[in-house]
Image (spheres, rainbow, N blue to C red):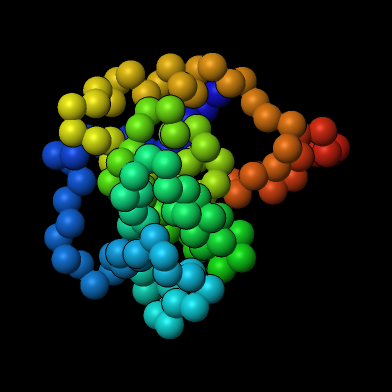
Amino acid sequence: MKRNLRILSAEEHVDDGSPNVLQLANDADPLAIEVCLQDIERIDLHFPKFTDGRAYSQAFLLRRRLGFTGDIRATGEVLIDQLVQMERTGFSSAVLREGVDASDAQRQFDRFAGYYQGDAVKAAPHFVDKG
Protein backbone atom coordinates (compact mmCIF):
# COMPACT_ATOMS: atom_id res chain seq x y z
CA MET A 1 0.00 0.00 0.00
CA LYS A 2 1.33 3.40 -0.96
CA ARG A 3 1.89 5.61 2.03
CA ASN A 4 0.84 9.26 1.83
CA LEU A 5 1.66 10.05 5.45
CA ARG A 6 5.04 11.71 5.93
CA ILE A 7 6.83 10.39 9.01
CA LEU A 8 9.06 12.83 10.88
CA SER A 9 11.43 12.35 13.78
CA ALA A 10 11.21 14.74 16.71
CA GLU A 11 14.35 16.45 15.40
CA GLU A 12 12.82 17.00 11.95
CA HIS A 13 9.73 18.73 13.34
CA VAL A 14 10.51 22.39 13.63
CA ASP A 15 8.08 24.89 15.06
CA ASP A 16 9.43 28.09 13.57
CA GLY A 17 6.54 30.24 14.77
CA SER A 18 5.41 30.86 11.20
CA PRO A 19 2.06 32.67 10.90
CA ASN A 20 1.11 30.06 8.29
CA VAL A 21 1.15 27.29 10.93
CA LEU A 22 -1.84 26.91 13.22
CA GLN A 23 -1.58 24.91 16.44
CA LEU A 24 -5.04 23.69 17.35
CA ALA A 25 -5.68 22.55 20.92
CA ASN A 26 -7.19 19.07 21.07
CA ASP A 27 -10.34 20.40 22.74
CA ALA A 28 -10.93 23.07 20.07
CA ASP A 29 -13.74 22.76 17.54
CA PRO A 30 -12.33 23.00 13.99
CA LEU A 31 -15.73 24.19 12.76
CA ALA A 32 -15.41 27.26 15.01
CA ILE A 33 -12.01 28.36 13.69
CA GLU A 34 -12.14 32.05 12.91
CA VAL A 35 -9.05 32.20 10.69
CA CYS A 36 -8.99 31.89 6.93
CA LEU A 37 -7.74 28.37 6.23
CA GLN A 38 -6.60 29.44 2.75
CA ASP A 39 -3.72 31.31 4.39
CA ILE A 40 -2.69 28.34 6.57
CA GLU A 41 -0.07 25.91 5.26
CA ARG A 42 0.01 23.50 8.22
CA ILE A 43 -2.19 22.67 11.18
CA ASP A 44 -0.59 20.89 14.13
CA LEU A 45 -2.96 18.65 16.08
CA HIS A 46 -1.73 17.38 19.42
CA PHE A 47 -2.12 13.96 21.07
CA PRO A 48 -1.46 14.64 24.80
CA LYS A 49 -1.80 10.88 25.47
CA PHE A 50 -1.98 8.05 22.97
CA THR A 51 -5.41 7.19 24.39
CA ASP A 52 -6.83 10.65 23.59
CA GLY A 53 -8.26 10.41 20.08
CA ARG A 54 -9.89 13.83 19.69
CA ALA A 55 -7.29 14.87 17.12
CA TYR A 56 -8.57 12.13 14.76
CA SER A 57 -11.98 13.82 14.69
CA GLN A 58 -10.39 17.23 14.23
CA ALA A 59 -8.34 16.02 11.25
CA PHE A 60 -11.39 14.41 9.66
CA LEU A 61 -13.45 17.59 10.04
CA LEU A 62 -10.64 19.74 8.65
CA ARG A 63 -10.28 17.54 5.55
CA ARG A 64 -13.86 16.55 4.77
CA ARG A 65 -16.05 19.36 6.03
CA LEU A 66 -13.73 22.34 5.78
CA GLY A 67 -11.80 21.15 2.71
CA PHE A 68 -8.38 21.95 4.15
CA THR A 69 -5.71 20.82 1.68
CA GLY A 70 -2.54 21.77 3.57
CA ASP A 71 -0.44 19.67 5.92
CA ILE A 72 -2.21 18.29 8.98
CA ARG A 73 0.50 17.17 11.39
CA ALA A 74 0.15 14.87 14.40
CA THR A 75 2.32 15.82 17.37
CA GLY A 76 2.66 14.61 20.95
CA GLU A 77 2.22 10.95 21.95
CA VAL A 78 2.34 9.56 18.41
CA LEU A 79 2.90 5.81 18.28
CA ILE A 80 3.66 3.65 15.25
CA ASP A 81 0.45 1.67 15.85
CA GLN A 82 -1.61 4.82 15.23
CA LEU A 83 -0.12 5.86 11.89
CA VAL A 84 -2.51 4.00 9.56
CA GLN A 85 -5.55 5.42 11.33
CA MET A 86 -3.99 8.88 11.29
CA GLU A 87 -3.57 8.74 7.53
CA ARG A 88 -7.12 7.49 7.03
CA THR A 89 -8.59 10.32 9.12
CA GLY A 90 -6.76 13.06 7.21
CA PHE A 91 -3.30 13.52 8.68
CA SER A 92 -0.55 14.10 6.11
CA SER A 93 2.43 14.05 8.48
CA ALA A 94 3.23 12.71 11.95
CA VAL A 95 6.03 13.43 14.40
CA LEU A 96 7.08 10.26 16.22
CA ARG A 97 7.89 10.31 19.90
CA GLU A 98 11.54 10.64 20.81
CA GLY A 99 13.37 7.33 20.62
CA VAL A 100 10.98 5.78 18.07
CA ASP A 101 12.67 4.70 14.84
CA ALA A 102 10.86 6.12 11.80
CA SER A 103 12.06 3.24 9.62
CA ASP A 104 9.89 0.85 11.67
CA ALA A 105 6.75 2.73 10.65
CA GLN A 106 6.52 1.22 7.15
CA ARG A 107 5.61 -2.20 8.55
CA GLN A 108 2.29 -0.78 9.74
CA PHE A 109 1.41 0.28 6.20
CA ASP A 110 2.60 -3.04 4.74
CA ARG A 111 0.08 -4.96 6.87
CA PHE A 112 -2.96 -3.56 5.05
CA ALA A 113 -3.27 -3.74 1.26
CA GLY A 114 -6.47 -1.69 1.15
CA TYR A 115 -9.82 -0.94 2.74
CA TYR A 116 -13.42 -1.48 1.73
CA GLN A 117 -14.81 1.64 3.35
CA GLY A 118 -14.03 5.23 2.39
CA ASP A 119 -12.07 7.58 4.61
CA ALA A 120 -10.95 11.22 4.77
CA VAL A 121 -8.52 10.76 1.90
CA LYS A 122 -10.67 8.62 -0.44
CA ALA A 123 -14.33 9.24 0.30
CA ALA A 124 -15.70 6.56 -2.07
CA PRO A 125 -15.72 2.98 -0.82
CA HIS A 126 -13.42 0.48 -2.55
CA PHE A 127 -16.26 -1.32 -4.33
CA VAL A 128 -17.64 1.80 -6.10
CA ASP A 129 -17.32 1.51 -9.88
CA LYS A 130 -14.50 3.81 -10.92
CA GLY A 131 -15.31 3.59 -14.62
Frontmost residue, 67 versus 117:
117
Residue at 30% over, 41% down: 77
Query: Taking 10 as reference, is 113 above or below it?
Result: above
Which residue is at a point 54% across and 17% down the rendered structure image? 111
At horizontal 40% and vertical 80% (from top left) the residue drawn is 35
Note whether residue 61 is visible. yes
Q: Nearer the viewer, residue 80 or 130?
A: 80
Q: Is residue 64 above or below residue 122?
A: below
Tally of numbered discs: 0
Q: Nearer the viewer, residue 19 or 60?
A: 60
The percent position of residue 28, horizontal first and vertical second, equals 42, 69
Classify the position of the N terminus by image quarter: top right
Position of 56 with respect to 72 (left or right) is: right
Question: Which corner quadrant of the image does residue 88 belong to?
Answer: top right
- Farthest residue to the bottom: give it: 34
Q: Which quadrant does the C terminus fall into? A: top right
Q: In the drawing, does residue 72 fall left or right of residue 62?
A: left
Image coords of residue 75 (percent x, y): 30, 48
Residue 71 visible, this orientation? no
Q: Is residue 107 left or right of residue 113?
A: left
Image location of residue 56, percent across then percent down: 50, 50
Residue, x 64% and y 44% (percent of image)? 119
Where residue 102 sits in the image (x, y, percent)?
28, 26
